[in-house]
Structure formats: structure tokens, C-alpha cells
Image (tube, rainbow, N blue to C red):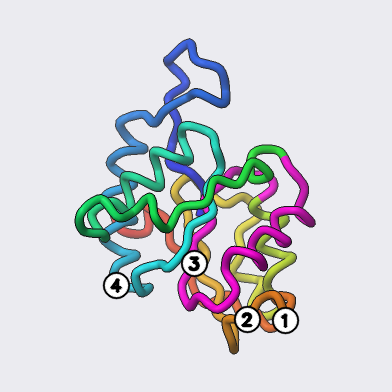
Amino acid sequence: MRHAKSDWNSYESDFNRGLNNRGYKNCQIISHELKKLINIPGKFLVSPAKRAQLTFEEIFFSWFKDNQLSNFLEIEDELYGGSIKKIIESMKRNFSGIETCVVIGHNPILNELLHNISSFNKNLIPNNLVTCGCIKINYKNYFYDQNNFIDGSVSEYIYPKKFT
């Protein structure tokens, strides 16, 4: 998942930019649609950038009771300008054995990551994953440390404008 639309009107650094009104609205749309599409995630890898953190909270906070959401969160510095290799290593370490997992980050690294962790139906991956856009990839098993993501099949691409 790519972070929601960020606020370019603030004088914050790129890392500290929040979301704009459209970003918050799109998070509500995607939260609603994802609930129909996936099970409650067992783990999240999220970029440390403020806009990615806010996207995570806005979309998934309502999915969890008693503020348990942070128990499933792993901040992954590599998602903000890091390497694909290290992101994949983190995914193997954090996601193995968990059925539904979510990565929230930035382009262009997300598009590269998507092509690296999927083998089938890559034609569903857009050239530029839009803000708040989500790609669903299915795997035959959830032991990513063993299967090395080689059997990933892209099954869905959702984005806010698809539902407005």
C-alpha cells in the first residue's frame, strides 16, 4: 500500500509531512473497501515517515479493539529510501507464518518491491501506484522465509477513485 495523499502546504520536511484532506478522506474509503477484501492483518511493516504512519492509523485503527493496533506494527526504516533486499529480508523475518500482512510505504520503491515479490499477474501492477493504492498478492503458503515470495500472484489493485 502506498501512503495517502500528503500535505504539501505545510512547511514540514518531506519526512514530517502529514496528510491533506483528500488523504484522510481516501483512507476512509480504502479502509471500508479493504475490510471486504482481506482478513484483519496480523502484522504491518510501515515506513517511519509521518504520512505513512498516519495512513496506517487512519485505515486500520477501527479494525482493532482497545488500541491494540500498535502490537502488530513494525516500523521499517528501509521503506523510506532503503533497499529492496533489506525490505524483503524484513518481510521474511516479520511476516513468516502470518496469513495477512500489510506494507505501507512510498514510490518508487513500492513499485519495485511489488515486482520482486510477485510472480503471476504482474500486469495488474500499475506503472505508478497511486496514493492510497493497494495491491493484494496471494501466496500458496505463509512461510515467506522458505518460499522466498516466488509464488506470489497479484489478485487485486484497489485505489480510492475506483470507488468514487
**Where is residue 122 drawn, in percent x and y?**
67, 72
Q: CA distance from mark 2 to mark 1?
A: 6 Å
For numbered disc 1, what is the local secondary structure?
Answer: helix
Residue indicated by mark 1: 146
Verify CB contact (< 8 Å) between mark 2 and mark 1: yes
Vertical relation: 40 (above or below) 153:
above
> Which residue lies under the disc numbered 3?
101
In percent of the image, x 43 and y 14: which residue is there?
Answer: 10
The kind of residue on which mark 2 rests is Phe
Q: Left or right of 10: which side holds 78? A: right
Q: For residue 85: magenta?
A: yes
User: In the visual, does 9 lie left or right of 15?
Assistant: left
Residue 110 colored in magenta in the image: no
Which amino acid lies under the numbered mark 1 shown in the image of this protein?
Gln
Specify start and end residues of the magenta stretch as a single range: 82-109
Residue at left offset 59%, top offset 43% = 106
Most foreground residue, 43 or 81: 43
Pointer 4 or 2: first along the chain: 4
Residue under label 4: 36
Marks 3 and 2 in Cβ contact (< 8 Å):
no
The residue lying at 42 percent from left, 25 percent from top is 7
**Badge 2: residue crowd in 10 Å (few <14, some 14–19, many ≥20):** some
Q: Position of residue 150 (x, y in %)?
A: 73, 79
Mark 4 burial class by Cα count in 10 Å: few <14, some 14-19, many 20+: few
Tell me the number on the disc at residue 22: none
At mark 2, the secondary structure is loop
Q: Earlier in the sequence, mark 1 or mark 3?
A: 3
Residue 61 vertical position relative to residue 148 in the rendered view, above or below: above
How much space separates mark 3 and mark 4, taking CA atoms? 15 Å
Query: What residue would you read off at disc 2?
Result: 143
Q: Nearer the viewer, residue 112 or 44?
A: 44
Residue type at mark 3 is Cys
